[in-house]
Amino acid sequence: MSKQDTCCSIAPYFKVPAQNLVRFKDLCARFVETTAQEVKCLYYGFSFDGNQVHCREGYADADGLLAHLDNVGALLQEALQLAEITRLEIHGPADELDKLRGPLAELNPQFFTIECGFRK
């Protein structure tokens, strides 16, 4: 893998009780609006399968991912009042993941190290 690609992605999966789904979708719009201002965000969006929700997001590097979590911290706390995170994945090159392991330990994510591939 190219040493130049420092992209990191975070993949949270939420389970939203039916009675909270409309409010959660409204909150997603606020997440998108807030995140759109982040210079290191490469892509960001929510996808739905009934009450299962996935946030698809990628950042230029570990610092961008950490800045994002700081930026949306209050929104995330609101989201966790409406839904639970059922799975949390972090993907990236080993050097970048090493920067995330300590700060994200409390969230208990599963880390996936990218070993081959490309990004255009």
Image (spheres, rainbow, N blue to C red):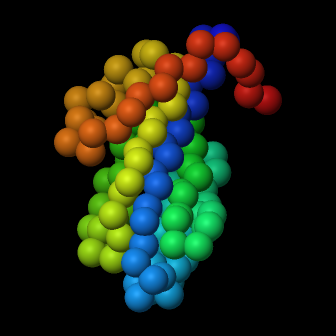
Q: Residue at x 32, y 54 (%)?
A: 70
Q: Residue at x 34, y 25 (%)?
A: 99
User: Taking 60 as reference, is 83 above or below it?
Assistant: below
Looking at this view, name the residue that lies furthest to the left.
106
Residue 25, image x, y percentages: 52, 79
Left or right placement of residue 69 versus residue 106 in this view:
right
Q: Does residue 37 appear in this view?
A: no
Residue 93, image x, y percentages: 52, 20
User: Taking 2 as reference, is 87 above or below it?
Assistant: below
Q: How many numbered markers are drawn?
A: 0
Asked which quadrant contains residue 105, the reply is top left
Left or right placement of residue 83 versus residue 113 in this view:
left
Q: Quadrant of the N terminus?
A: top right
Q: Nearer the viewer, residue 83 or 101?
A: 83
Looking at this view, name the residue that lies furthest to the right.
120
Q: Residue at x 59, y 13 (%)?
A: 115
Residue 119, image x, y percentages: 74, 27
Q: Nearer the viewer, residue 10 or 60?
A: 10
Asked which quadrant contains residue 72, the reply is bottom left
Q: Does residue 1 appear in this view?
A: yes
Residue 43, image x, y percentages: 64, 51
Q: Nearer the viewer, residue 16 or 114?
A: 16
Left or right placement of residue 111 versus residue 106 in this view:
right
Q: Quadrant of the C terminus?
A: top right
Q: Residue at x 61, y 67 (%)?
A: 48
Asked which quadrant contains residue 71, the reply is bottom left
Left or right placement of residue 77 versus residue 25 in this view:
left
User: Taking 22 as reference, is 101 above or below it?
Assistant: above
